[in-house]
């Protein structure tokens, strides 16, 4: 099937919205998978397989889900060390949902510079509003607001001009 010039210009808009929505769902599922990994101690491959069987992945960026899940797990210590000094409580006392969100968001700030830092922070806040404790989103926001300049200094500073 060939596309004429006009059709190809119309295609990117719906595709971009679809990709954003698919990434949002991927983040949500990845956060839940990271929570399960933390709580149950199952292998990442078992958890990923279970999530792919139990959830309809037709509207999910499956590659991004995989990248987040494995990226966070492989960088867990480094990510925890990045945001631990910014916490008002010890890491081991942190709510497991908020911990999963902070790890996911810290990983995105560190590893996915193609995702604007404001988007990373907003997505973390939205996950905390959906899955976290009553004021968990305020806590997540405060930590990510302090973490972003440490991991994305030039981008954050460019926005202040």
Image: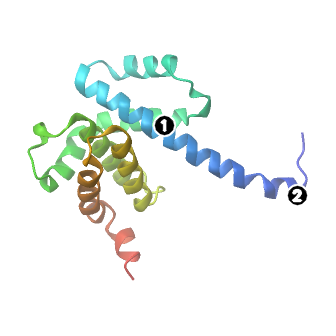
Q: Residues within 10 Å of mark 2 (few under 14, many from 20)?
A: few
**How far is disc 1 from disc 2 in space, using C-alphas?**
32 Å
Which label's residue is closer to the chain start, 1 or 2?
A: 2
Residue occupying the point 41% across, 75% down: 159
In the displayed image of the protein, which residue is found farthest to the front? 134
Q: Which mark is residue 26?
A: 1
Label 1 element class: helix
Residue 77 position by quadrant: top left
In the displayed image of the protein, which residue is found farthest to the left? 90
Residue occupying the point 23% across, 24% down: 39
Q: Nearer the viewer, residue 11 or 25?
A: 25
Vertical side of 16 occupied by 38: above or below: above
Label 2 element class: helix
Q: Position of residue 149 (x, y in %)?
A: 28, 66
Q: Nearer the viewer, residue 113 or 13?
A: 13
Asked whether the beta carbons under mark 1 and mark 2 sit within 8 Å of each other, the answer is no
**Can you say which quadrant of the picture contains the N terminus?**
top right
Residue 48 position by quadrant: top left
**Can you say which quadrant of the picture contains the C terminus?**
bottom left
Task: Name the residue carrying label 2.
Answer: 5
Q: Position of residue 87 (x, y in %)?
A: 14, 52
Residue occupying the point 86% across, 53% down: 7
């Amino acid at each position: 099937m060939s596309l004429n010039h006009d059709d190809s210009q119309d295609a990117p808009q719906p595709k971009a919205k679809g990709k954003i929505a698919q990434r949002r769902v991927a983040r949500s599922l990845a956060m839940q998978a990271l929570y399960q990994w933390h709580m149950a101690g199952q292998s990442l491959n078992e958890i990923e397989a279970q999530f792919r069987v139990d959830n309809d992945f037709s509207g999910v960026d499956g590659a991004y889900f995989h990248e987040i899940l494995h990226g966070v797990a492989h960088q867990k210590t480094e990510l925890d060390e990045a945001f631990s000094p910014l916490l008002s409580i010890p890491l081991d006392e942190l709510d497991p949902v908020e911990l999963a969100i902070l790890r996911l968001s810290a990983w995105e700030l560190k590893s996915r510079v193609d995702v604007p830092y404001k988007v990373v922070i907003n997505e973390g806040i939205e996950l905390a509003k959906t899955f976290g404790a009553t004021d968990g989103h305020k806590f997540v926001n405060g930590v990510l607001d302090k973490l972003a300049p440490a991991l994305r200094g030039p981008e954050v500073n460019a926005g202040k001009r």
